[in-house]
Structure formats: C-alpha cells, structure tokens
Image (tube, rainbow, N blue to C red):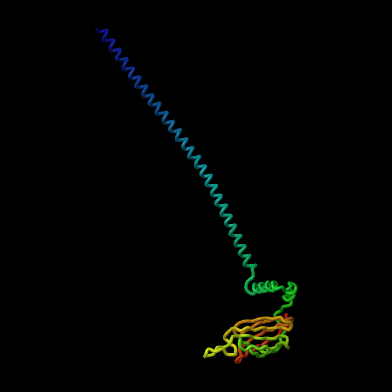
C-alpha cells in the first residue's frame, strides 16, 4: 500500500511540474507575442511616420512649385499692366487732340481731295499769325432766290468781279397759307461762291453765316446777314494767302 501511495504522489508532483512548465511556457509565449507586437507596432508606426513625412515633403515641394508659378504669374501680370500703362501713356502723349487733331484731319482730307503734299507743305511753311488784309471789308446786298422768284441777275460780284455770290432759300408762307416771292430768313439758305474759271464753294445754314474761302493767292472772309425783304447782305474781307 505504501508503495502504491508513493507512486501516486510522484505522479501528481510530476503533473504539477508539467502544468507549471506549461503555464510558464504560455507566459513566455504571451510575453514574446507582446514584445513582437510592440516592436512590430513601433515599426509600423515608424513606417507610417516615414510615409507621412514623405508625403509632407512631396506636398511641400508641390506647394513651393505652385507658389513659384503664382509669383511668376503675378510678375507677368504686373509686367503686362506696366506695358499696358506705357502704351496708354504713349497713346495719350503721341496721339494729338484739340486743334492739332483737327489740323491733321483737315490735312488728311485735303490730301484725299488730291492736293499735292509738296503744295500743302509749302502752305504750312508760309503760314504765319499776322496777315496782310484790306483795311475795310467790301459790303454788298443781293436778292436771295426762291422757288417762285429765281433770276440769274440775283447775284453780286466781289473782289473786283473775281467772285460771284448767289443765294437760294425757302419762300415765306403768309398768314393765309400762301407762298410769297421772298425768302424766309428763319429757314436754311444755300450760298454759292463762284470764282472766275468755275471753281465753287457752297455754304448752307440759317443766317447769319460765316465762311473763309481761299481762291488762288487770296483768302476771303465772308459774313452773310439777313437784310430787308428778299435781300441778304454780304461782307467780304480780303487777305493775302497764305
């Protein structure tokens, strides 16, 4: 009996040792797994940090590139605005205005009419502020033609017969709504200046009218005023031209 009991105790002791070693081994495995998980997690974290840092570097470089492009675009815009302002200033400074522009337009018109450029340059060169004009104007009156009273004799000569002036207007309508023979000074009239040789100049509008006409080497400054019934008065001052 004592022998069998001793075997049983030894067996139990061996089983306890086995369970202890198994438990210890389990603890070791858990510890090893924990250590592995810790270091693996740390490695993953370091890899993620490295990836994030790489992305940050890429994004930073991209941001720098975009900033450089934005600065380049702003520089181009500033350069374009500066160039536009320079062209605007150049246009405002070089494109004439006022009387100068009117003179240039008149020059272009006369050249378009066939005036020789050399002739035009000579006239501009000879032009001066002071002019040699007759002491007193020549003043005459003439009958203004109308649709129902028109005669070749209704004209006047000026400049020693070198210029003939005729006028045409609308007839007056009286209170009975009848047309009279004389012209209506409140309506536009047409004045025609004819030089010996056939050259003509026309002037249209409501009296009084003023016009400067050049015939050859003379400039005539005309003023046409309404006169007594059927008549208009013309005054002409002759000046040397140019």
Front-most of residues 194 and 94: 194
Against 49, is 87 above or below?
below
Against 47, is 131 above or below?
below
Q: Is residue 158 left or right of residue 62?
A: right
Quadrant of the image occupied by residue 139: bottom right
Front-most of residues 4 and 79: 79
- The residue that appears at 25% across and 8% down in the rendered structure is 2
**Residue 34 at x, y = what percent?**
39, 29
**Residue 44 at x, y = what percent?**
45, 34
Against 222, is 71 above or below?
above
- The residue that appears at 52% across and 47% down in the rendered structure is 63
Front-most of residues 121 and 138: 138
- The residue that appears at 60% across and 82% down in the rendered structure is 205
How many discs appear?
0
Q: Is residue 52 left or right of residue 7?
A: right
Quadrant of the image occupied by residue 132: bottom right
**Residue 24 at x, y = what percent?**
36, 22
In which quadrant of the rendered image does the N terminus lie?
Answer: top left
Front-most of residues 147 and 93: 147
Q: Residue furthest bottom?
A: 228
């Amino acid at each position: 009996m004592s022998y069998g009991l001793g075997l049983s105790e030894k067996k139990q002791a061996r089983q306890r040792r086995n369970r202890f070693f198994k438990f210890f081994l389990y603890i070791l495995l858990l510890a090893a797994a924990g250590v592995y998980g810790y270091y693996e997690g740390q490695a993953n974290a370091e890899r993620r940090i490295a990836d994030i840092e790489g992305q940050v570097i890429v994004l930073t470089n991209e941001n720098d590139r975009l900033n450089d492009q934005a600065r380049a675009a702003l520089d181009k815009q500033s350069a374009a605005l500066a160039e536009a302002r320079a062209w605007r200033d150049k246009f405002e400074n070089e494109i004439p205005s006022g009387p100068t522009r009117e003179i240039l337009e008149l020059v272009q018109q006369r050249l378009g009419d066939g005036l020789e450029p050399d002739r035009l340059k000579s006239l501009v060169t000879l032009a001066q502020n002071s002019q040699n004009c007759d002491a007193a104007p020549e003043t005459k009156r003439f009958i203004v033609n109308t649709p129902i009273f028109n005669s070749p004799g209704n004209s006047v000569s000026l400049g020693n017969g070198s210029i003939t002036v005729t006028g045409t207007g609308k007839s007056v309508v009286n209170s009975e709504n009848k047309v009279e023979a004389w012209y209506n000074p409140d309506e536009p009239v047409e004045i025609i200046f004819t030089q010996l040789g056939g050259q003509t100049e026309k002037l249209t509008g409501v009296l009084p009218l003023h016009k400067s006409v050049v015939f050859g080497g003379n400039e005539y400054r005309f003023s046409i005023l309404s006169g007594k019934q059927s008549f208009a008065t013309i005054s002409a001052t002759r000046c040397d031209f140019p």
